[in-house]
Image (cartoon, rainbow, N blue to C red):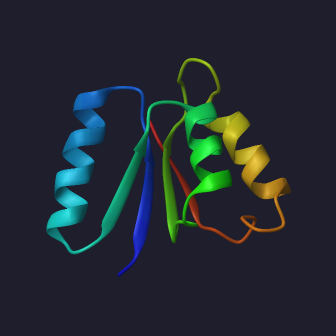
Amino acid sequence: MKRILIVEDEYGNAEILQILLEGEGYRTAIASNGRAAWELLQHDEKPDLILSDFMMPVMTGGELGVLVRESSALRHTPFIFMT
């Protein structure tokens, strides 16, 4: 089963995405900002897709995207910005 990481600081938006995606059979994880997502990516199962908001506190989606692309383990993971 494919796993999707949702990176979104608006809890209601993240929850709606989670419900929709899990209803289609995907497994999901949620992070509330780029830094929290980066921590999950370092210690958790690698996702098959990252859906990320762009403007977030602590670390933006853009900053997270740079880290993902610089990571040899993650650089080929599809990364989609939501705004």
**Farthest residue, direction top:** 57
Quadrant of the image occupied by residue 24:
bottom left
Q: How far across and down, in percent of the image, does residue 60 sit?
A: 62, 28
Against 27, residue 56 (above or below) is above
Placement of the N terminus among the 4 image quadrants: bottom left
What residue is shown at x 63% (from left), y 54% (from top)? Answer: 43
Position of 25 relative to 68 (above/below): below
Residue at 65 percent of width and 43 percent of height: 38
Along the viewing direction, whichever of 47 and 42 lies nearer the viewer: 42
Quadrant in the picture for residue 59: top right
- The residue sitting at 51% across, 71% down in the picture is 48
Where residue 12 sits: x, y (%)?
22, 30
Residue at far front of view: 43
Residue 81 in picture, x, y percent from top left: 52, 47
Camera-nearest residue between 73 and 53: 73
Looking at the rendered image, the quarter that the C terminus falls into is top left
Residue at (50%, 65%) from the top-left corner?
A: 49
Horizontal arrangement in the rendering, residue 27 relative to residue 52 (left or right): left
Please say if 70 is above or below 3: above
